[in-house]
Image (spheres, rainbow, N blue to C red):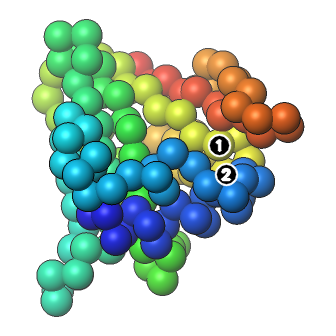
């Protein structure tokens, strides 16, 4: 998981105009201790090429997506869509929330295709913002 994260998140950092973002500071130990549930996408040779992580909050009724990562050499193959679909179909959900860099057009487009609506923007650095999204079921 750590290797996949180190390969995928530099792309998001560049898209939003930063040198680094918090996931790039993770270690295998901090990932193991993060308390998130992970779903992976593997190729036939057992290579991990994508993953999504989440927590269920509000008594399990809200899906809080924390990470979405796809290996850069597997972009545009529908992996992120499959991962997002898999967690949005978990039973008992009434709402899902996610945040991404406002300038990360591929991620913004993905979340909007899945019915997420923007709910707010947070400035994390000068001229760098994160957009928060919500989807209700």
Position above or below: 38 against 125: below
* Residue name at image x 72 percent, y 53 percent: 18
* Residue name at image x 23 percent, y 25 percent: 56
Asked whether the viewer can see residue 49, the reply is yes
Circle 2 crowding by C-alpha within 10 Å: few under 14, some 14–19, many from 20: some
Position above or below: 27 against 61: below
Residue 95, horizontal then vertical, whole percent: 35, 20
Q: Nearer the viewer, residue 31 or 68?
A: 31
Left or right side of 48 for 3: right
- Quadrant of the frame with the C terminus: top left
Q: Nearer the viewer, residue 58 or 90?
A: 58
Q: Are marks 2 and 1 in contact (CB under 8 Å)?
A: yes
- Quadrant of the frame with the N terminus: bottom left
Residue assigned mark 1: 101
Residue 62, horizontal then vertical, whole percent: 29, 19
Q: In the image, which disc is placed on residue 104?
A: 2
- Dot 2: element: loop
Left or right side of 58 for 131: right
């Amino acid at each position: 998981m750590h290797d996949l994260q180190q390969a995928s998140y530099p792309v998001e950092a560049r898209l939003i105009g930063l040198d680094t973002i918090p996931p790039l500071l993770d270690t295998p130990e901090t990932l193991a201790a993060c308390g998130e549930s992970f779903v992976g996408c593997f190729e036939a040779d057992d290579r991990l090429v994508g993953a999504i992580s989440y927590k269920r909050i509000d008594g399990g009724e809200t899906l809080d997506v924390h990470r979405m990562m796809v290996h850069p050499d597997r972009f545009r193959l529908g992996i992120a869509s499959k991962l997002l679909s898999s967690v949005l179909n978990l039973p008992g959900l009434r709402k899902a929330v996610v945040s991404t860099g406002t300038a990360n057009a591929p991620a913004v487009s993905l979340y909007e295709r899945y019915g997420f609506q923007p709910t707010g923007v947070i400035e994390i650095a000068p001229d760098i913002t994160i957009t928060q999204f919500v989807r209700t079921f």
